[in-house]
Amino acid sequence: MSLGRPEFVGHIEVRGLTKRFGSFTAVDHLDFEVRPGRITGFLGPNGSGKTTTLRMLLGLIRPTAGTATIDGHRYVEIDNPLTVVGSALEATNFHPGRTGRDHLRVQAAVAGVPDRRVDELLELVGIPAAARKRAGGYSMGMRQRLGLAAALLGDPKVIILDEPANGLDPEGIRWLRGFLRQLADEGRTLLISSHMLSEVEQTVDDVVIIANGERVAQGTVQELRGDPTAYVRTSDPERLADALTSRGLTVTPKGAGLRVTTEDLAVVGDAAHAADVAIHELRAEQTHLEELFFNLTESEEHRNRNLVGVSTADLPPPTGAPIDPALLVDAPQEDRR
Amino acid sequence: MIPAIRSEFRKFFTTRLWWGMLIPTVLAGGLFAWLAATLIAGSQQPGAAPAPDLDNPQMVSTVYTFGLNISRLILLAIGVLMVGSEYRHKTITGTFLGTPKRARVMGAKVVALLVIGALYGVVQTAASFGVGAFIINNRGFPILPDGAARTLALSLLVLGLWGLIGLGAGILIPNQVAALLIAVGVAWIVEPLLGLLFASQDWGKSIAPYLPSNATNAVVNAIETNPNGATQLSWWAGALALLAYAVVMAGLGTWRTLRADIS
């Protein structure tokens, strides 16, 4: 499959990007880049400035300072941009009285794409029949798929998706993962925002994490995960540490126990057994990435500054009682597996 | 520019708005032609001073264009909705993603609206002419006296211009509901009242002809609806006055839209 415009490789660069709304700084001197042909996850708690950043990249919001470019061009400078950059920002941007198919045809006219391609894409995202009904009655999942189809209309090199997994059921999320991977395998550059690490961790190659409009971390998922570690508590830490070290493992004290650099818990158990010490606790630790992201979403200073509604403190205790989903929409969500 | 214009046409013809607005346009065209012809014919009282009858070219123009009083409001609303519904349903995001040069989007809307106005004008004129010519012919007068053909052609222009005025109001006031209420309210109620006020004052007599409804009547050579009406503009001056309203509002609105953050 040839990707539309060969003059674009799909390298996104964000330099010193800043946006202030009055006294509120939504994005603060943000720097990151997205490498061509890879899937980059753009992560951060709700209200951390992800959407504002993406909208600046797409020429919808004027930056207060800094630049956001695609292969060195600002979005507004790209001729027929839909054939270079495809994006889906919100699953609500449809006229309720227009069918999904006609929504795509409106965009297709701008991109200079024939109606045949519209029907192909509707097949591809799996809503060919529903697309002939008016969009007002669509479920969130259908809106996401329609938005995805719209992003792909112009066969773009770069695909930018804002929270594409929102509103998808587990089956839909699985489908989305496979779909995104396929798009990347075709040589496209993908930038995908999410406030849920678990949604994208298995899909993305690179990660950019922001909080309060500032970059907190950037790197490949491998780098940020760090080496897998296990935590063990025992009756005799010193003896176990010696035993583990003699097996070539790195051991550091942590709290009342030890942190062992390994992903194989059995090794630790066997070593303890051989050294004749009792194990009181043994578990795999969170990866560095998980820990980093969890701390971000939980720490008070990184709480969503835009949030006027509910905080987690207002939510019912975890008794298993159903929670009104409306309450959860904007609330900072914990994501710990 | 051409792709953006094509996209605007697709937007317009893929919701129910276009035929929902076309039906009242047809009805207004036919009914008001019948109403005007009947009123003019009925004003001929034996013994009284002779009133202008349907052999008077301006009376004929009035019959053919009386429905414009409604259809210009319809085009005004269409113009407002062309921008307003994009903000309301946030489709403006997709529109600006496809055409990030925003002035080009507005230009495409202008072209599309002029054509849509002309299309509605053809339909409304066909209805008005069909009904009006039938009555005039029955009374034994010529159905196309001097200037009537020009009047028919110019009603297409008038509707296009009223569409642009609506577009201007829509760009200027992105809140669709507010824009609709204000635009229709001003055009339908406030402006005619101002017209009466201006026409009754010495100082207002020179302003009154430039008001949108009077300028509209001037373009299509219809009789003034104001009893003490001041002198009428020539058709082209009337058209320019309408254009000026559209340009000022659309210009101000576009200037602001180019800078606005779309979120």
Image: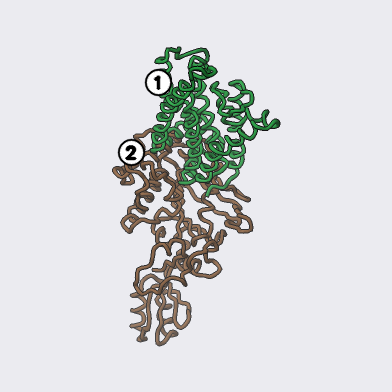
Chain colours: A brown, B green
Name the element at disc 1: helix
| Alpha carbons under labels 2 and 1: distance apart | 43 Å
Residue density around tag 2, few if under 14, some if 14–19, many if 20 or more, within 10 Å: some
Q: Residue A274: in sight, yes or no?
A: yes
Q: Is residue A115 shown above or below A151?
A: above
Q: Is residue A293 shown above or below B242?
A: below
Q: Chain of mark 1?
A: B
Task: Give x and y (percent) for residue B219.
Answer: 56, 23
Question: To which residue does mark 1 refer?
Answer: B130
Q: Is residue A163 left or right of residue B103?
A: left
Question: To which residue does mark 2 refer?
Answer: A119
The one of A58 and A290 positioned closer to us in this rendering:
A58
Residue that extends furthest to the front in the rendered view of this protein:
B47
Which amino acid lies under the numbered mark 1 shown in the image of this protein?
Gly
Quarter of the image holding residue A269? bottom left
Residue density around tag 1, few if under 14, some if 14–19, many if 20 or more, within 10 Å: some
Which amino acid lies under the numbered mark 2 shown in the image of this protein?
Asp
Task: Give x and y (percent) for residue A259.
Answer: 44, 76
Quarter of the image holding residue A216? bottom right
